[in-house]
Image: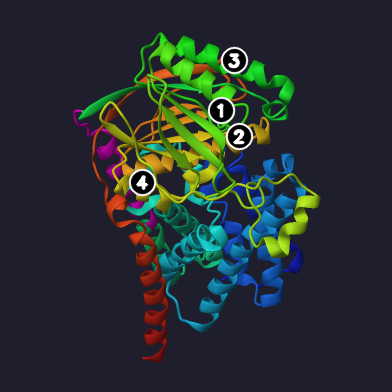
Amino acid sequence: MLRTLTNKKGIVLSFASGILLSLSFLNFGLDWFVWFGLVPLLIVIEREDNYKFLLKKSALCGIVFFGAGLYWLYFTTAFGLIIVTLYTASYVVLFSLLLKFINNRKALSPLKRLFLIPSLWILTEYARGHLFTGFGWAALGYSQYENLKLIQIADFCGVYGVSFLIVLVNAAIAEVVINIRPLFLFNKKVLIRTCGVVFMALSLVLLVYIYGDIKLNTTAPPEEEVKISIIQGNIKQSQKWHPFYKSLILKKYKMLTKMASFDEPDIIIWPETSLPGYLDESELFKEIKELARDIEIPLLIGAARIDSCEQKYYNSAVLFSKKGSLLNVYDKIHLVPFGEYIPFDFIFGFLRNYAEIADFSRGEIHTIFDVKRVDFGVLICFEDIFPGLVRTFVARGADFMVNITNDAWFLKSSEPYQHLSNSVFRAVENRINVVRAANTGISCFIDPYGRITGKVSSKGEDIFVEGYRTETIKINRINSFYSRFGDVFILIALITATGCVLGAGIKKTF
């Protein structure tokens, strides 16, 4: 066993862990860093005996990880970046203290630790994704959204299952590093235990990749096909609500829509709040109706609207028929706290004096739209980060999902790619197509296996470019395990963690 850490080494290791984890999410092609990025922190947890120091060092890791990984929040609010960073970092602290507490009180074998560590990690990820409206962004599994064979297990265990495997590999590497001295001395007992841990980790990784390979090579004939065009207007955030640009924005969307109409799609989709004003404005409403009638194709547009009866504002998706009639409306259910509304207004209402915060009301209905006899649901903005919300739409009959969003706030950063990773996992989890229409990108088509089959791009760029894309998506009503049963894997993790602790306790007693 390695000696106790000096304070300086503990700080360096904690900082290194935060940097490695953040680099896995920053679109530098370093997503593989996540497979060992947690190792330095696990060494700190193992060797730091002072809880106060461990709290500070794990907080440092979390602050560096989330502060650097979510740096793009600075473009909208520096204060928000600080608050979100401190909040998300607290879950790294919770994980570290829990693991240390258990290690200090239970005689855990290396094999038990191998399963305890990832179980505790994904339990904290799950809690972060649900408590206080939920913010599951940057769960470790999301870093692997381009690793198609790996992420196929999400149809059973969701993104948390991928996070579990990542942390399990980190735990195996940490076990080797922590026992490096007795391994070099060929301590037979330590050698057998460590080899057992490494063999178990490699075996599980191999099984996951075999499962992924089988899934990716399993095809079924489509039950239905829908031809869809997505529009990417590329409107700067500073222009979206400026009266001077109103007619120019509408003109651009109409032009792109008419160009897309030559592909004869079954539906054309605009991004979130793409309409340059409120839908209830008679002039804008008339323009959209006439456009739909002119091209004779249904239009799904993102628009802010006012309920004149209740005097409430909604962030909505609105479907117009090819004859120009309004068919159906979905009002965003999961609003962005401190962006689209202020939670606990009686406490935080004063923030309106310092920042521009909208006052949208929450939608209540999981609207199911239909096109060409195929049903679909709509996710607005960051609603695609909530697996449970997507499962609800699928349970109500959605054959595919549409995500309309406006990521212009975050400029040319890693945010659009991090956002995209959430949509990829929602597709794999539920074995459905996900169609994305984003104001500044990334607008694309994702098949039920997480493959991006087409996207709006220009000269190799897919963000902050304008254009449209038409693709035919194939509908297979697979009804995955995850769609039916949800986060059962979290329950398994809870049982595993409890079993490891209780089992170690019994071993110690007898």
Magenta residues, start to end:
201-221
Q: Earlier in the sequence, mark 3 or mark 2?
A: 3
Q: As drawn, is 481 to the left or to the right of 195? A: left
Measured Cα–Cα span from mark 4 to mark 3 = 32 Å
Identify the image quadrant of residue 283: top right
Q: Which residue is mark 3?
A: 252
Q: Residues within 10 Å of mark 3 (few under 14, many from 20)?
A: some
Q: Are marks 4 and 2 in contact (CB under 8 Å)?
A: no
Name the main secondary structure of what is drawn in magenta. helix
The amino acid at mark 4 is Phe
Residue bearing the label numbered 1: 441
Q: Which residue is mark 4?
A: 393
Task: Work out whether residue 13 can be spotted.
Answer: no
Please name the colour scheme applied to the rendered image: rainbow
Under circle 3, the secondary element is helix
Task: Return the mark for residue 197.
Answer: none
Rendering quarter of residue 191: bottom left
How crowded pointer 2 is (Cα within 10 Å; few <14, some 14-19, many 20+) is rated as: many
Three-letter amino acid code of the residue under disc 3? Lys
Cα–Cα gap, marks 1 and 2 = 7 Å
460 magenta-colored: no
Q: Residue at x 59, y 72 (%)?
A: 97
